[in-house]
Amino acid sequence: MKQGYGISQFYGKQFKTLEFTDEWLDLIGKPEVKGSWFIWGNSGNGKTVFSVKLAKYLSKFGRVLYNSMEEGLSMSLKRAFKLADVSDSDNITLLDKETITELKERLQKHKSPRFIIIDSFQYTGLSALTYKSLINEFNNKLFIFVSHADGKKPSGRTANTVHYDANVKLWIEGFKVFPKSRYGGTEPYTVWKEGADKYWVNEQKN
């Protein structure tokens, strides 16, 4: 049986948070370094570029793994990394279609990365149960899943379950990111201003 906590004990408990600032603070708040986040959107809306920008920002706080399970090391991913201005000085390691089994072996090593971005969720082979097992096994790490969309919903039943469970939910449409965060973030983030301006002007006309 797990230990119970009194109210004053609970209020005195400290949590590890990331001291986000500026537009990232507005988008997400000050998040804990654990659990899962969920990014989803339709193709061509800036999902990959945003995910790479997020990886670059998170690398200021610790090592980041970017597991490209869908594309692998491709020209389009290279373009996204260049658009996000990622360089060797950023603390990011790229993985080329590494399986969840291989990823778990990597994460079990001493001083393994704190942040894991997986693109895309539909290529993981995870079920609702194996997803929860992964999060619980590595409960001192933050997993960020990038997902396909079916309309405005995540694509697939398991993706919907993970989306529901996630501490931060980031919907991407028209090169803008719209958050639902348990850490206080409420303001949209613009991935690409020119593209966003054009998209949303056309949306208003329609």
Image: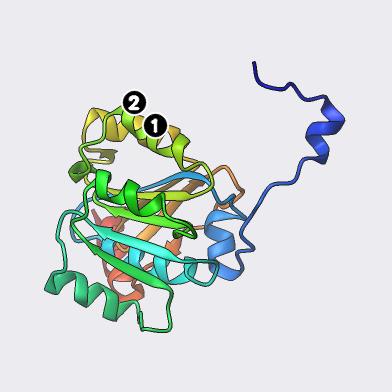
Which image quarter: residue 23? bottom right
Q: Does 139 sit left or right of 193 as displayed? A: right
Give the crowd class for mark 2: few <14, some 14-19, many >=20 residues within 10 Å.
few
Total labels: the figure holds 2
Q: Which residue is drawn at 31% across and 76% down?
A: 194
Is 64 drawn above or below residue 33 in the view shown? below
Q: Does 54 sit left or right of 100 as displayed? A: right
Camera-side residue of 79 and 142:
142
The image position of residue 3, as x and y in percent, is 71, 22
The reply to whether discs 1 and 2 touch (Cβ–Cβ < 8 Å) is: yes
Camera-side residue of 202 and 162:
162
The image position of residue 48, as x and y in percent, is 27, 63
Tell me the residue that label 2 is attached to: 129
Amino acid type of the residue tagged 1 in the rendering: Ser
Q: Say what secondary structure mark 2 lies in.
A: helix
Label 1, label 2: how far apart the Cα atoms are: 6 Å
Tell me the residue that label 1 is attached to: 133
Is 9 drawn above or below residue 73 in the view shown? above
Quarter of the picture holding the N terminus: top right
The image position of residue 125, as x and y in percent, is 20, 37
